[in-house]
Amino acid sequence: MKLLRVGTAGAERPALLDEAGVLRDLSGLVGDIDPALLADDAALARLRAASSSGELPALDAAGLRTGPPLTGIGKIVCIGLNYHDHARETGAAPPAEPILFMKAPDTVVGPEDTVLVPRGSAKTDWEVELAVVIGRRSRYLESDEQALAAVAGYAVAHDVSERAFQIERGGQWDKGKNCETFNPLGPWLVTADEIPDPQALGLRLWVNGELKQDGTTAEQIFPVAEVVRYVSQFMTLHPGDIINTGTPAGVAMGHPDPKPYLRAGDVVELEVDGLGRQRQALRGA
């Protein structure tokens, strides 16, 4: 299923995009797309049945904002330097273990919402990523099979980063990763049954119409199952938690000088195979 939330910010309603591409209203069946729903197999089965029956009312998508596909996000765990080609372009050795950092849930915005360039920013960068959405409480997972069974679905994430804040200001990466609007998510949460192989997905990103990233999850140093299993050794994962699994080559930081960092007025578009497309205009904070 392709689950999403539509409407003005803070007042979104749950919806579903059916196999014919028709937007369907779920508000008569569920209150929202939230962690409780993701953990409820019976409720998800009812949504699948309703979608197949054609009984769900259609929504007019014209002019309707798409919000983040999930509310009630607990935490966002991010994996740094997780693509072989991205490590090569930055001159870094592939890490022996996954690099973890966190993003606050309040960085999440809709897939076409405005992204703000922070005040004082000179190095705002783009990163298209595969987001993994957790559907089961998970701790100390022992196998790839257990890890994938904990995944409710997948989404497109834009891990926007301010490199000077991240790297040049001392301390941890969080200063460059948690500016408001720095995690557009969606348009859909695609349930895991529709993505049989998360290691066979293309990821692409354009800036002002110019292709900048064109990669594949096959290049991941630590595949999705290993990432989920690994993270569960250090923290408990709950339904509605998100793991951003890293970005392929082509970020601004990997370009020769002068690096083409983002500025107010730029437009970024990005997509992941089977998970939909995003588009954001940038403006100053």
Image: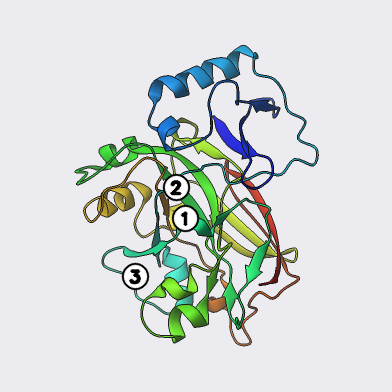
Quadrant in the picture for residue 102 = bottom left
Q: Nearer the viewer, residue 238 or 216?
A: 238
Residues tagged 2 and 3 counted as in contact (Cβ below 8 A): no
Compared with 53, 180 (above or below) is below
User: Three-letter amino acid code at disc 2?
Assistant: Ile
User: Three-letter amino acid code at disc 1?
Assistant: Pro
> Left or right: 109 with respect to 135?
right
Q: Position of residue 147 (x, y in %)?
A: 29, 42
Q: Position of residue 28 (x, y in %)?
A: 60, 21
Compared with 60, 258 (above or below) is below
Taking the spot 63% from the left edge, 51% from the top edge, the residue there is 111
Mark 2 Cα shell of 10 Å, populated few (<14), some (14-19), many (≥20): some
Gap in Å between the C-alphas at discs 2 and 1? 6 Å
Compared with 166, 75 (above or below) is above
Residues tagged 2 and 1 counted as in contact (Cβ below 8 A): yes
Mark 3 Cα shell of 10 Å, populated few (<14), some (14-19), many (≥20): some
- The residue wearing badge 1 is 105
Quarter of the image that includes the C terminus: bottom right
User: Three-letter amino acid code at disc 3?
Assistant: Pro
Q: Secondary structure at mark 2?
A: loop
Compared with 21, 200 (above or below) is below
- The residue wearing badge 3 is 94
Gap in Å between the C-alphas at discs 1 and 3? 28 Å
Q: Position of residue 39 (x, y in %)?
A: 38, 31
- The residue wearing badge 2 is 73
